[in-house]
Amino acid sequence: MATKCFLAGHGSWSTKDGYTAVPKGCTLTFYTKNAKNMFTSDMFAVIEGSFTGEPDQVVGSYGSVPNLRLFPDLANEGACKAKCPADAIVYMHQYSGGYTLADIFRIVKPGDAYDFVWACCRFNDLTDVGGKDMGVNAAEGVNQYYFNKAGAAVGVGGKWVKK
């Protein structure tokens, strides 16, 4: 049986990081749409199992995904770990440069099986010129988008503003 591993913190994708493949025997589930941010309350709900939405994307073994980078979220680390079920893992770190999915996937040894869950933003370095109406790099609310003036660092002084 696969071990559920929540990848929690701040997340983003730089096109220079390219793509990576999900390891054999593993899956990677996204609850955040590509180029969208995740509200902290949704991150907590995904981890504790109370999120009422459906996954946006589930990628199986060998599937190609953007090589997202996971950054620290020191302000919410304790809460994330407290909300994690006993039979799962929350992976968070304190390296300010962030770790890519390829870096994280290196922990997988032959025969290991993990259900990775990306429980953070999928911010990207593509500009939102012409894309703001589609919500590029926004958090999606009910019938509206919320944009963070501070970019991907939502928990570090950023303010959400409605479109």
Image: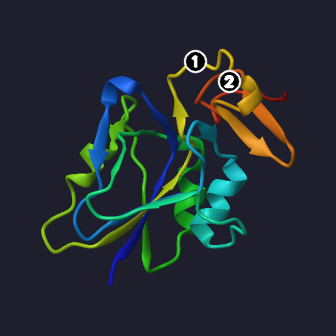
Vertical placement of residue 12 versus 86, above or below:
above
Q: Residue furthest left?
A: 110
Q: Which mark is residue 135?
A: none
**How far across and down, in percent of the image, does residue 148 sit?**
71, 27
The kind of residue on which mark 1 rests is: Thr
**How far across and down, in percent of the image, does residue 144 sit?**
85, 39
Left or right: 140, with 4 as reference point: right
Question: Residue at (59%, 30%) from the top-left corner?
Answer: 153
Vertical placement of residue 44 versus 137, above or below:
below
Which corner quadrant holds the C terminus? top right
User: According to the image, label 1 marks what residue?
Assistant: 127
Question: Residue at (40%, 30%) from the top-left corner?
Answer: 96
Element class at badge 1:
loop
Q: Nearer the viewer, mark 2 or mark 1?
A: 2
Q: Residue furthest bottom?
A: 1
Q: Residue 28's image quarter?
A: bottom left
Question: Residue at (55%, 56%) from the top-left corner?
Answer: 78
The kind of residue on which mark 2 rests is: Gly
* Mark 1 burial class by Cα count in 10 Å: few <14, some 14-19, many 20+: few
Front residue of 94/68: it is 68
Cβ atoms under marks 2 and 1 closer than 8 Å: yes
Element class at badge 2:
loop
Question: Residue at (44%, 73%) from the top-left corner?
Answer: 88
Vertical placement of residue 93 versus 55, above or below:
above
Front residue of 83/3: it is 3
Left or right: 160, with 94 as reference point: right
User: According to the image, label 2 marks what residue?
Assistant: 131
* Mark 2 burial class by Cα count in 10 Å: few <14, some 14-19, many 20+: few
**How far across and down, in percent of the image, does residue 53 sit?**
70, 65
Front residue of 78/33: it is 33
Q: Residue 59's image quarter?
A: bottom left
Vertical placement of residue 148 versus 83, above or below:
above
